[in-house]
Amino acid sequence: MTISSGEISIPFAAYRLAMIDLYNEIYKPTSGKLFTQCYTPFCYILKNKLGLDIPTGQASHILRHTFASHFMMNGGNILVLRDILGHADLSMTMRYAHFAPDHLTEAISLNPIASLTAATKKVEVLSPLCRHFLF
């Protein structure tokens, strides 16, 4: 469930389904949630074993934000990130867009006018006689 009570799909490798089945077989969760018992121990490890100073109750939020930031820094697609995070509105996801390393460079290379400019430059190097026959 999400903050807005919607459901999201989380992509993962197929072999992990066997791990989830094994977890369910061993721990037999009754709440309908996959990992109800691991949040407190997980936070303990973050704080005491890894030395991370994460405010109480903020671990999942900070890790979610960190994931989203690194996803974009690694060249992830903003629309895919929106789906992963379960945002209904792209404007919520756009806060991570500035982490994309080449987002402006890519925009320039995908600009249709850029291809027209490149074609014009090729024509300019042709001799005047050739241009006369081409146009």
Image (tube, grey):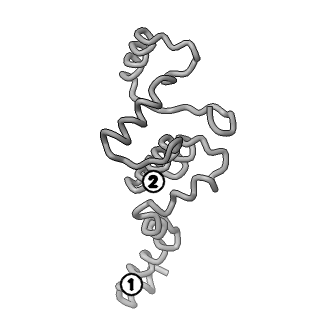
- Residue 105 on image: x %, y %: 43, 68
Name the residue that disc number 2 marks: 69
Q: Residues within 10 Å of mark 2 (few under 14, many from 20)?
A: some
Looking at the rendered structure, the secondary structure element under dot 1 is helix
- Residue 45 on image: x %, y %: 35, 36
> Height in image: 3 above or below 99?
above
Three-letter amino acid code at the position of disc 2? Ser
Labels 2, 1: front one: 2
Q: Which residue lies furthest to the bottom in this view?
A: 128
> Height in image: 123 above or below 93?
below
Q: How crowded is mark 1: few (under 14 residues within 10 Å), some or many (20 or more)?
A: few
The residue under the point 49% across, 63% down is 98
- Residue 35 on image: x %, y %: 48, 24
Task: Write down the quadrant of residue 50 in the picture.
Answer: top left
Task: Write down the quadrant of residue 123 in the picture.
Answer: bottom left
Q: Which mark is residue 109?
A: none
**Tag 2 and tag 1, C-beta contact below 8 Å:** no
> Height in image: 35 above or below 2?
above
Name the residue that disc number 1 marks: 130
Seen in the image, is 89 located left or right of residue 74?
A: right
Three-letter amino acid code at the position of disc 1? Cys
**Of 102 and 63, the residue lying toward us:** 63
> Height in image: 134 above or below 51?
below
Quarter of the figure that contains the N terminus: top right
The residue under the point 41% across, 33% down is 42
- N-terminal label among 2 and 1: 2
Seen in the image, is 87 located left or right of residue 51?
A: right
The residue under the point 62% across, 45% down is 87
Q: Which residue lies furthest to the right in this view?
A: 4
Seen in the image, is 30 located left or right of residue 108?
A: right
